[in-house]
DNA sequence: AGTTAAATGCAACTTTGTTGCAATACTACC
DNA sequence: GGTAGTATTGCAACAAAGTTGCATTTAACT
């Protein structure tokens, strides 16, 4: 726990940025999780240890994302889920969504191709892949 | 235009359901479009011809979806986009999203596989593929 | 310790979508 | 064509996620 706070603080300082209490707590919370976590859940957890306004949390999450310390995926109910970036230079990857408990995790790589032709004039730039099914808990 | 209303009405009647004015207008509007359309835009268009409450539109869209006359995709800003089903028994397909004008269109098929292994205990059920890039207008 | 810009808290607001209930409009039946 | 009965609609009120403006506080530097 304290470990993670140290790690979070270092990650922020390594970018030459201000390691505020809110930033450190939020990033540490995300580092503690394997899955992607929603605003509401982060808020709840951080608040057990520290006062934190929801607007501040929105801004912290946005900032962490700009600094590439975090990335986000949309959940099944169309809210953002956040996940700490382990790699400083993250690469595109697929996601798994459990259709029962709605958990979302990042998958290593993605080997997706769209081999059919796009309509004339269309240019593909990037591909997003989402695997749906049942997670280990829900099987 | 009148053609599309006829077609919409028939599609609904073919299911043995009540062809209300709202349903026919909404489905006709969707049939007129190649791309997937947001609630707000449908509302605006239908209202040029007919009074329509936004709640009713939400309910009509939900109903059309239950009856498999329509399907929906989430947009880049996480709102629902609706597209008429051409096929009565629709199959899974990929989507293309223009990163400039945010237009979303349906792509024929998808040939997506996740070849890496899932974590132990995880079962994949269905795969979603989204191609991002520039559409013909925006290239 | 003092300075200063950046970050935070609070209040108010927007947008998308939902729920309950009374009024209305389809359709089937005569 | 007119009527009855149920499904659909409109309206008002609400919920949740996210945004904006502004005054106050805090982190980092000297
Ligand atoms: Mn991810
Ligand atoms: Mn589609
Ligand atoms: Zn699960
Ligand atoms: Zn475009």
Image (spheres, coloured by chain):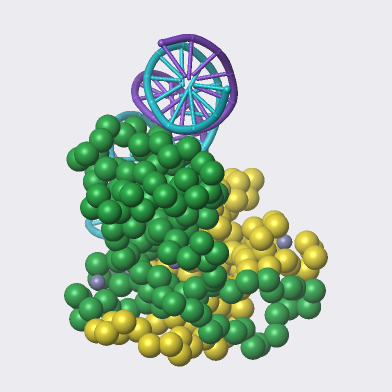
Chain colours: A green, B yellow, C purple, D cyan
Q: Is residue A41 left or right of residue B25?
A: left
Q: Is residue A5 above or below residue D27?
A: below
Q: How many numbered badges does the structure rendering display? A: 0
Q: Nearer the viewer, residue B73 or D19?
A: D19
Q: Is residue D23 above or below residue B27?
A: above
Q: Is residue B66 above or below residue C22?
A: below
Q: Is residue B116 visible?
A: yes
Residue D20 position within the rendered picture, expressed as x and y whole percent measured from the top left? 55, 29
Q: Residue at x 38, y 74 (%)?
A: A96
The quadrant of the rendering that contains the C terminus of chain B is bottom right
Q: Is residue B127 left or right of residue A32?
A: right
Q: Residue at x 78, y 68 (%)?
A: B136
Residue C16 position within the rendered picture, expressed as x and y whole percent measured from the top left? 47, 48
Q: Residue at x 27, y 32 (%)?
A: A51
**Quadrant housing residue B110:** bottom right
**Quadrant housing residue B66:** bottom left
Residue A133 position within the rendered picture, expressed as x and y whole percent measured from the top left? 32, 79
Q: Is residue B84 left or right of residue C11?
A: right
Q: Nearer the viewer, residue A45 or B84?
A: A45
The quadrant of the rendering that contains the N terminus of chain B is bottom right
**Quadrant housing residue A126:** bottom right
Residue A24 position within the rendered picture, expressed as x and y whole percent measured from the top left? 36, 44
Q: Is residue B62 visible?
A: no
Q: Residue at x 32, y 64 (%)?
A: A35
Q: Nearer the viewer, residue D13 or C16?
A: C16
């Amino acid at each position: 726990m304290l470990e993670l706070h140290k790690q979070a603080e270092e990650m922020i300082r390594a970018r030459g940025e201000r390691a505020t209490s809110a930033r450190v707590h939020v990033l540490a919370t995300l580092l503690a999780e394997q899955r992607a976590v929603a605003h509401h859940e982060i808020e709840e957890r951080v608040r057990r240890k520290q006062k934190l306004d929801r607007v501040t949390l929105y801004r912290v999450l946005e900032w962490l994302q700009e600094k590439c310390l975090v990335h986000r995926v949309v959940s099944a109910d169309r809210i953002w889920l956040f996940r700490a970036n382990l790699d400083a230079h993250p690469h595109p990857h697929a996601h798994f969504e459990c259709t029962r408990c709605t958990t979302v995790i990042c998958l290593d790589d993605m080997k997706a191709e769209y081999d059919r032709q796009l309509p004339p004039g269309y240019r593909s730039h990037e591909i997003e892949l989402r695997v749906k099914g049942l997670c280990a808990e829900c099987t």
